[in-house]
Amino acid sequence: MKKTVSGNEAIAYGALRAGVKVVSGYPGTPSTEVISSLLKMDLPGTYVEWSTNEKTAFEVAAGAALAGSRALCTMKMSGLNVCYDSLIGIAYSGCKGGLVVYVADDPGVTAGMCEQDTRGFALMSDMPMLEPCSVAETYELTKFAFELSEQIGGPVFVRLVTNNSQSHACIEIEERILPPESQPLPVRDTAKFTKAGAAICMTQHRDLIARLAKAEEIIAQQDRNRMRLGKKDGVGIISVGITNGYQNEALESLSEAGVNVSEISSLELIASIPFAKEKIETMISHCSTLLIAEELEGHIEKYVYMQAYKMGKQVKILGKEDGTYERIGEYDAQILRKGICKALDVALPECFADFKAAPEDNCTKRPIGFCAGCPHRGTYMGIEAGLKKAGLKKKDVLITGDIGCTILGISPPFEILWTELAMGASIPLAQGFAYSNIPSPIIATIGDSTFFHAGMTGLVNAVQHHINMTVVILDNGWTAMTGMQVNPGTVQSCQMGEWQQLDLIQVVKGLGISEENLYVVDPYDHLSVADAVKECLEKDGVKLILSRRECAIQAARRKVKYSPVKVIPEKCIMCRKCIHVSGCPAITLGENSIALDPSTCNNCGLCAQVCPVGAIEKQAE
């Protein structure tokens, strides 16, 4: 049937067509919608889960593949760092069932975190990495990835970037193939599935290298890398994945503008790893100038340089090394047009002169902040108030931040966080600052989902070493920033699957936080947060504040109602303290008083708590 889907949904449907048995992952933009879309479907025989982190997710999928089932693991680029320890082990051992690792990179940093090129992991792991260009190709290459994995006996990457993971197209979706209900007990083979000794590891390494060579043969046999030879000793373009589409758009538009591009040779790669050795050598032999179009790192470009040197062929290579392209940011047709014109030694047509290549040039700059009614707003208001109660200035207290909605404490009006590194890093970073004896109390903030993902080990370490610090867990009950996915602390919901909800209070007690050092507060009562902060700063050892209130968006979806908040205009002196302290977007300025936007205000009452003249009133619960 024909269906309009995104690139991420194409991954999901491709996996279903391939008969996937297990799908696991951790939410991270721009990859999240694969599992989100699957969880909305009725899929008897296929197990789908949000795992606690990417390492766990990969190990779940790997176990299924070792047993002979087809499995898919999904993540964003940063998640690959988390799971790599296990991934390289499975790459060495290989697997029986098809094992596909879907990773979404983010050139241009649309979704935050580092602008990481995960193709480096594929190179380091000697693992194939397929790179679809379009939504339709994503669907087809996902199916092929499972076949390729089973043919070579090892895991295979599928890599998208933000632009094609989030793009949409109408494609033909085939009927789902049901996976086998069960698998026989796998063969016990310690030489294959353990790393017990140098001989075992080196044998597995040889097998891994051989699997990559076999993948190159299979891709070549199926002629999946598309090559078109134009004028001998002319210009050639080598592109991969998403840049294949940019290249075709650029060539078409340049042709319409009168530039002769008909004699250009092209090689459109569907895989960055393994390198398409024979076709790249053909392009080197056929062309006098080669333009290499690949986002972020120049992995293919460096391979072309090496092959040209080995072949003794003098060819002009344009790409990142000569400054034609940059190693940062996402590409588009305009960037490709400029490179093509440079390769052809012609001027860029005037009709393209005003095109802005950098996406940020076309964006309106705006601050990022908490949603109206976000409980994290009350937590940070409380931290600020607590520091004042302790006689401290905000600028003199080092507070580490973590990934997720928590990090919005860097934005006005709070501007209270100093760091953001990686999932769960706030607590160990704070410990390092404490060891440095800096003249400041040490506070670490972290969200509930991030704490389950990677924060627990840091807390254990801090408790073990009796660090003098305060940890604030901002518990809104969801993995909110990536789209309200469940985590181990989420209440049971209508989403697919059943799970046991873990109570963070019991979890942190189990990790060593004593009763007297544990404070459970409501961020909608920011002064209770302030009192807890002040008390924590007066104690030694690890103290933990659990600031607990459900995400305002999810509460609204579940029809949770709070008692009304109203403005008394005649009392308002327009001091704007409610705005300056809370930064709530639901507060606006009227003619003679502030006003609350009823379409966004959720009646949290934080503004009423800071009004100095009682011009904002909240009715009793």
Image: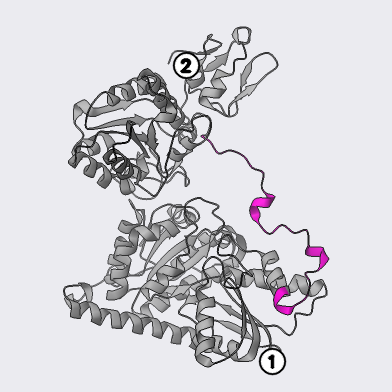
21 left or right of 463? right
The quarter of the image holding the N terminus is: bottom right
Q: Nearer the viewer, mark 1 or mark 2?
A: 1
561 left or right of 520? right
Report the residue marked by disc 1. 232
Q: Nearer the viewer, residue 607 or 428?
A: 428
Asked if residue 554 is among those painted magenta in the image, a careful observer would answer no
Amino acid at dot 1: Lys
Q: Is residue 589 depicted above or below 197 in this figure?
A: above
Q: Which portion, as a residue range, is magenta? A: 342-370
Q: Position of residue 213 (x, y in %)?
A: 40, 85
Q: Nearer the viewer, residue 133 or 329?
A: 329
Residue at (78% x, 64% y) in the render: 352
The quarter of the image holding the C terminus is: top left
Labels in figure, total? 2
Asked if residue 363 is among those painted magenta in the image, a careful observer would answer yes
